[in-house]
Image (cartoon, rainbow, N blue to C red):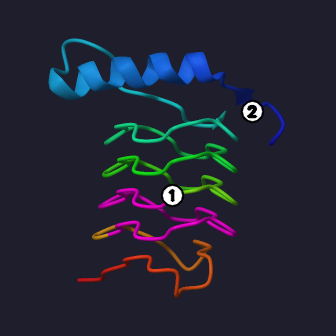
């Protein structure tokens, strides 16, 4: 965990996801999830809808993100090492300089995602679906 990074509890992230869902339905209600620079390592985030959420520089190592929807989210500089992202949606997400080393990305969708030469992916061949235009 980086110095100064705030650890988020499962209850806190559950509430952030609930409010974010309301915000996705109507931006006048709820609140956009801003988890930039937060430590969410090891949390259960299966099936969460965090489309368009702020997760820049977040620590999601060892998190369970199976079937999570992170489309259009800012995931730049985030740590996903050893996270489970099988069947996750990362379409049009900002993945610049994100670290996916050791992450499980089987059947993850990354259509239109932005990544850079500093983005670290696990070895290809685990059915990660990475499309380029």
Q: Which one is nearer the viewer's eye here, 122 or 99?
A: 122
Helix, strand or loop for disc 1? loop
Q: Position of residue 75 (x, y in %)?
A: 49, 51
Quadrant of the rendered image containing residue 124: bottom right
Q: Position of residue 84 (x, y in %)?
A: 58, 56
Residue designated by label 1: 85
* Lateral position of residue 8 relative to residue 35, left or right: right
Q: Callout 2: 10 Å neighbours few (<14), some, many (20+)?
A: some
Decide which of tag 1 and tag 2 comes sooner along the chain. 2
Reply above or below: 60 against 28: below
For image coordinates 18% across by 13% down, the residue present is 28
How far apart are the two marked residues, 1 and 2, measured between alpha carbons?
22 Å
**Is residue 74 within the magenta segment?**
no
Q: Residue 116 carries which label?
A: none
Image height of 39 relative to 31, above or below: below
Residue identified by numbered label 2: 5
Q: As drawn, is 116 to the left or to the right of 92?
A: right
Residue 127 appears at what percent x and percent y? 44, 80
Q: Are marks 1 and 2 in contact (CB under 8 Å)?
A: no
Question: Residue at horizontal 50%, vertical 74%?
Answer: 116
The image quarter containing residue 120 is bottom right
Residue 93 is a magenta residue: yes
Q: Give the range drawn in magenta.
A: 86-110
Relative to 77, is 53 on the left or the right? Answer: left
């Amino acid at each position: 965990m980086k110095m100064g990074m705030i650890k988020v509890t499962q209850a806190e992230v559950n509430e952030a996801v609930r409010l974010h869902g309301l915000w996705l339905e109507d931006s006048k209600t709820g609140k956009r999830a801003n988890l930039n620079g937060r430590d969410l390592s090891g949390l259960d985030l299966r099936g969460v809808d965090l489309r368009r959420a702020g997760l820049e520089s977040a620590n999601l190592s060892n998190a369970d993100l199976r079937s999570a929807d992170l489309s259009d989210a800012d995931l730049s500089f985030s740590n996903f090492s050893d996270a489970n992202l099988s069947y996750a949606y990362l379409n049009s997400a900002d993945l610049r300089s994100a670290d996916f080393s050791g992450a499980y990305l089987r059947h993850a969708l990354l259509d239109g995602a932005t990544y850079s030469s500093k983005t670290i992916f696990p070895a290809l061949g685990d059915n990660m679906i990475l499309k380029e235009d």
